[in-house]
Image: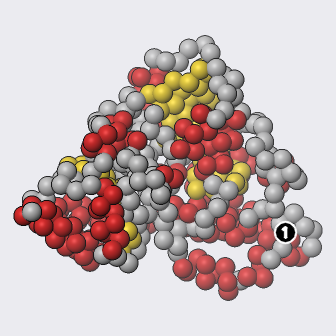
Amino acid sequence: MIYFDYAATSLKRKEIFEEVIENFEKFNGNPNSLHSYGRDSRKIMDESRRIISKKLNANFNEIYFTSGASESNNTVLRNFENTKIITTSIEHDSILNSIKNMNFKDVIYVNPNKDGIIDSCDVIKNIDENTKLVCVMFVNNETGAIEPVYEIGDYLKDKKIHFHIDATQALGHFDIDVKKLHCDSLSLSGHKIGGINGFGILYWKGKFSNLIYGGEQEREKRGGTSFVIGSFTMAKAIEKAEKEREHIKKIKNYFLKKLNENKFDYQINGNTEKSSDHILNLYLPWVSTEFLLTYMDLNSIAVSAGSACSAGSLNPSKVIEKMYNEERAKHSVRFSFGFKNTTDDVDEAFDVLKKLFEKRKND
């Protein structure tokens, strides 16, 4: 099976999990326990937090471990209920669906252009004395579009307005420096770069209210027994992912080269000059998304229509609809690349696509 769905979740890094198994006794304890088992686990968790905080240029005590970016995003939004907030219409479902199910005095949704990028001026012009939160993703999970988070952060840095960034798809592919971004909070998930599922972080500068109440874990902000293995795998994966950027860029460019050399009938949803190297969203007017996903799967190639959080519905991508229209969304597919992909993978996937394209062209 060839895997081109890293934006949904990365394939796991076997060597990290083998390291866990080889040192399994060190993960057995509850890190809040005072005995040697607990101290071993606490040491692992503290070292993981140190690595993650350093990578983000954050303080050690500003990193909170959660079950993933969805929980982190929910925590942020809960802290700003009954206020005016500004976000975008192309955020992840953990933002958009949370807003629908919470109470806000006013919500402004900024729409993207045909590159999938919002205009920072559209955010700024909607800010007034009632605005308490601005929430914008770093990299779009369906198109890879890089959003103007630096420009927005620079504008907000001296304002009494909380700036939250969902940086889930940026993790590993870009340097993430919370001080340069001028953000007040930021969310990440470890499984996007080959860590274990069900673990993420919330960076928060300052005080906030809990989403989960329980014990005194995470400086009394997030109750529940700590997920030591989760923290370990995420910290290890971050260090590896940074070294793989050029490889992933090479795979994406090779894919595009194959399409162009063979005069393939396609258009890019977005702009490759303004998007992350690990995501490529294509409009293929000659085939429906639903048929193509099934066809590729039957030929042992994993791709997706867009956000994995909409899996099972096969509804057209809401992001592509916002950028273009519903009809284009019904003929679009997302390829997302990762550390295990090779040019041979691209060759094989392209051969499958080309056979289908030639068949449709001759029908």
Residue 337, given in percent of the width and then of the height, sits at 37, 64
User: In the image, 82: left or right of 358?
Assistant: right
Q: Which residue is mark 1?
A: 30
Question: Residue 332: x, y in percent?
Answer: 29, 51
Please say if 307 is above or below 229: above
Residue 240 visible, this orientation: no
Which residue is at the far left? 362
Q: Quadrant of the C terminus?
A: bottom left
Q: What residue do we see at 12% from left, 67% from top?
A: 359
Residue nearest the observer in this picture, 270 or 296: 296
Classify 211 as above or below 2: above
Outermost residue, right direction?
34
User: For this view, does 134 lie left or right of residue 76?
Assistant: left
Q: Is residue 176 visible?
A: yes
* Residue 38 figure quarter: bottom right
Q: Quadrant of the N terminus?
A: bottom left
Which residue does the image show at 60% across and 50% down from the upper left?
69
Q: Amino acid at mark 1?
A: Asn
> Is 268 placed above or below 207 here?
below
The structure residue drawn at horizontal position 78% and vertical position 62%, both measured from the top left corner, is: 226
Q: Position of residue 300 (x, y in %)?
A: 34, 76
Q: Is residue 322 above or below residue 259?
A: above
* Left or right of 289 in this view: 164: right
Residue name at image x 86 percent, y 51 percent: 214
The percent coordinates of residue 336 (x first, y second) are 37, 60
Q: Considering depth in this image, is 265 or 15 the residue closer to the camera?
A: 265
